[in-house]
Image (spheres, helix red, strand yellow):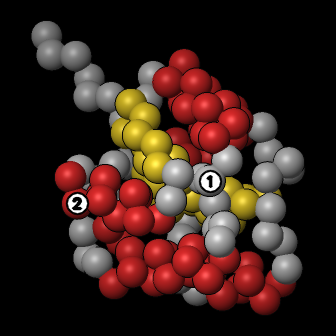
Amino acid sequence: MARPKKRTVLLIDQDAHALTIYEKRFEAAGWKVTRAKSFDEAKKRLTRSIPDALVTDLHPLAEGLVFLEDINQDPVLTRVIRIVLTDVGDRRTIKEVEGLGINAYVLKGHVSAQSLINKVKSFLV
């Protein structure tokens, strides 16, 4: 009997500490994790393989918005679960980002790693 395929997630954050925490938690939950410390690095990774989910910070904000706009223009990438995990909490930014077709906008410090994983899983059902 074939083993079930591991779900894949691309984590994007400039904060290496945050990347490590979420990477370990996703791996412990059975996910295959790819990391990127910049949006340019994330774009390169996305040309090599398409993850089931993408969890991204927005820093730096202008680059984060352009990155999300680019993903929104790619029909293949629009099928990827897209979660924004950031500390940018102003209403204008939240509204702008939600208009880019993301699945969820989550504020850092307001969600545990396990809750984040559960949220991502809820979109994959």
Residues packed near mark 2 inside 10 Å, few (<14), some (14 to 19) or many (20 plus): few
Q: In the image, what residue occupies the spot 46% across and 43% down?
A: 35
Q: Amino acid at mark 1?
A: Gln
Query: Does residue 35 show up?
Result: yes
Q: Earlier in the sequence, mark 2 or mark 1?
A: 1
At 34% across and 49% down in the image, what residue appears?
A: 51
Q: Does 121 sit above or below residue 62?
A: above
How many other residues sit within 10 Å of disc 1, few (<14), some (14-19) or many (≥20)? some
Q: Which mark, by number, is residue 47?
A: 2
Residue identified by numbered label 1: 14
Judge left or right: residue 97 versus residue 4.
right
Badge 2 element: helix
Tell me the element at label 1: loop
Q: Quadrant of residue 96?
A: bottom right
Q: Is residue 85 left or right of residue 64?
A: right
Name the quadrant of the N terminus.
top left
